[in-house]
Amino acid sequence: MKKAILRTDKYFKIDRVDKRIYGSFLEHMGRAVYEGVYQPECKFADEDGTRTDVTELVKEMGVTTVRYPGGNIVSAYNWEDGVGPKELRPVRLEAAWQNLEDNSFGTNEFMDWSKKANITPMMAVNLGTRGVDAARNLLEYCNFPGGTYYSDMRRSHGYENPHNVKLWCLGNEMDGPWQIGHRNAHEYGTLAAQTAKVMKDIDPSIELAACGSAGLKLPTFGSWDATVADRCFRYIDFLSMHTYYNNQNKTLDDTRDFLAHALTFKEQIHSVVAACDYASAINKSKKRIHLSIDEWNVVYRPHGKVPADARWTKAPHQIEDVYNLEDALLVGTMFMTMLNRADRVKVACHAQLCNVIAPIMTSDNSAWRQTIFYPFKHCSKYGHGVALQSIVECEKYDSKHYTDIPYIATSVIYNEEEEQIVIFAVNRDLDEDCSLESDFRQFKDYKLDKHIVLNHEDIKAVNTEENPNNVVEEVKNANSKFEDGKLTSVLEKHSWNVIILKK
């Protein structure tokens, strides 16, 4: 058994964790909305047509924020199509994903569902085919009490009180050549700044996220971020960051490499933070633009192409990836990476929520949890408080694209109000357990509460509708011993661990 040492201190504070990092993403794509959260003909549907089984799983997962309606769709989305009497709503060709969109689920349905699911909405505006005017009108519709054209339109639709949406995205992935209305950094930065100015003039209480680069591999990454952060500096609160990883070849050698992608994720965060701080420097300001990592996940079919026979149909089966244990380990490690940058990562949206590259899957007869559901659930449930700096001394390994990869990755959260310490840990070793030793003597009178493990003898194991509990969380308190302030924990090979200490 390998050995590792975790060193931390309650005075080595990174920052308080913003609960909005436990967000998700709901786009009008495939079966994410239709046959996902919304399916009026389903036996699980409530009076509004939303699936109660899905809503309960969303609440169990602990989702705090959901970004809507996109994603690529938003760059050609007319928000007016999705409000008012459903029989009057137009059916549109949704060009980004080649779906047929009947707009039976729109802004108000999303707001109603958000309340049921106990989540805070994060709305995106169209800066692809539209701009300042449509954005200000949508904000007026959502947030102004009444007495104006769009606020009274909302009231006529049955919503007397405003939705008071506080978090907004200024478009989506606008440096991506695939994006409808794709622009260069100067064009987008100018449009986003103009839009942000008007939106904050209407409602100064809102927070705004401008589009960062759509990905690390784009030639515009870095320069785009710096330009946009500078041009929008006065008006925005966040710069977005998107990233996806996969293990296409799926051999064990590739698994070792795949589990190290969190190192690239860490460097990408560092680079985007640097771009934001560059904007602070040249604007001679103490203001700090923080990160909204509002798309991140493992994805195996990133282009999301619809089969030819399913083009221009409603709710086709589209990138419904099936996730295994190793995917859950990377998702957990990426969560820890964000927690360890709690000083700058304030919003995050795991993409997506249901059916499309999602932790929750549905059929007409059931809904089930994919493996990646569990690290999300554990982080959102236990990852509240102050993130502490933690240093792990352990053995390292090399892979095809990385060197000096620590076998053990950790994040430590101290919740003084709840008198709770949480250690999240992943053992990347595919062959051997590891004994993790930690000294918590400065935390007086704490005891081991529980040690939760997500593992399976087969790292490629998955959950399916027929076998939904193949990979599940287990409480294994025997894996940890806490005596005289010293914690010794066995981290099983290729496992996700949550170790909780309480008074």
Image (cartoon, grey):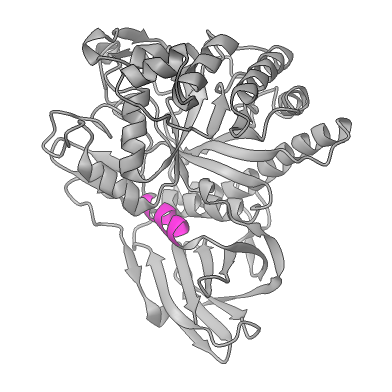
Asked whether 217 or 475 is in front, the reply is: 475
Q: Residue at x 43, y 44 (%)?
A: 250
- The quarter of the picture where residue 185 lies is top right
Q: Position of residue 348 (x, y in %)?
A: 54, 42
Q: Residue furthest left?
A: 43
Please determine whether, in this image, residue 151 is positioned above or below residue 417: above
Residue lying at 34% horizontally and 40% vertically, measured from the top left: 115
Nearest to the observer: residue 125 or residue 205: 205
Residue 131 in sight: no
Q: Which x, y percent locates residue 357?
A: 38, 36
Front residue of 414/236: it is 236
Residue 12 coordinates in the image, percent (x, y):
72, 68
Q: Which residues are magenta?
A: 373-381
Does 378 appear in magenta? yes
Q: Position of residue 9 (x, y in %)?
A: 69, 74
Quarter of the image for residue 232 reads top right
Whether residue 269 is in magenta: the answer is: no
Q: Main secondary structure of the magenta part?
A: helix
Task: Tell me which corner region of the image, top left, top right, bottom left or bottom right, holds residue 186.
Answer: top right
